[in-house]
Amino acid sequence: MKPAPFAYTKAKTLKEAVTLLAKHKDDARLLAGGQSLIATLNMRLSAPDLLIDINGIKNLNGIAKKGKYVEIGALARHAQVEHSDVIAKHAPLITLAMPHIGHPAIRNRGTFGGSIAFADPAAELPACLLALGGEIDIAGPRGKRKVKADAFFKGLFETALRPQEMITAIRIPAADKATRVGFAELARRHGDYAIVGLAASARGNGKGLADVRLAYFGVGDTPVRARKAEAALAAGDVDAAVKALDLDPHDDVQATAKTKKHLAGVLLRRVAKQLMEARG
């Protein structure tokens, strides 16, 4: 299929992009990597009057450690993040997840901020951001603000972004010697959306784990934290953590809810092993 007709403009500054969004409201869409947008345009699931290309905006694609945080610009390409030494050293969970995102052609074009804004519940990066307790920098007609990951994902493809707002950067607490991370997913083929996936972070204290965060994807309308399982794993009991998994997946084209719940337990054992083996 072909998209419905639309106008195109390329914003050169953040201010220009926000002004255009405010002017055209629901009739405009942002174009960054376009890996999700182009598909929805072609299927006419989205039919904006105006496409605002933001790829020309400077300073939105950087990756840097700033104090206790790693800051990733919204326009940073997946491939750029995947091969970043800063990410590998200070945000290793992201490095673990990146090879699972689509295929090289997709990672060469897709953007970090675009994945967070699209908020596909089966995508890796929203779950990683939730597992790491990150935050999102947002700009809009009313100025700039920050939103914690725990409050950002609201529902199926629904986020805390207000009308005419856009993501400018994602900020993640930088890893230190006590940081422990784990990642695993199950998909029919490499590069497919996961049937079930799990991103996790914790802090090692020499005897066990603390501050455990388990963020599942593919099991709900948003990435989901398994809080009861987190508490059990922090207590050192993996079997109890599996039994305590507080997930309520739905049947979908990938698998039944029962299968997803079982696979969530399988992944928890795998990721718990990663966390336990790394503690020190």
Image (tube, rainbow, N blue to C red):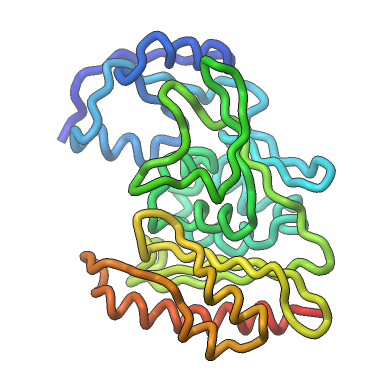
Give the left or right position of residue 253, taking residue 276 as reference.
left
Coordinates of residue 119 in the picture (x, y in percent): 42, 46
**Residue 110 visible:** no
From this view, report whether residue 46 is shown above or below residue 211. above
| Viewer-closest of 192 and 114 | 114
**Residue 6 visible:** yes
Coordinates of residue 192 in the picture (x, y in percent): 36, 62
| Viewer-closest of 52 and 232 | 232
- Residue in the image at 53% along x and 39% along y: 113
- Residue in the image at 67% along x and 83% along y: 235
Give the left or right position of residue 269, taking residue 70 as reference.
left
Coordinates of residue 181 in the picture (x, y in percent): 66, 69
- Residue in the image at 52% along x and 46% along y: 151
Looking at this view, name the residue that lies furthest to the left: 1
Q: Quadrant of the N terminus?
A: top left
Coordinates of residue 150 in the picture (x, y in percent): 55, 50
From this view, report whether residue 203 is shown above or below residue 119. below
Report the label total. Answer: 0
From this view, report whether residue 265 is shown above or below residue 189. below
| Viewer-closest of 3 and 50 | 50
Q: Quadrant of the C terminus?
A: bottom right
- Residue in the image at 45% along x and 57% along y: 223
| Viewer-closest of 197 and 152 | 152
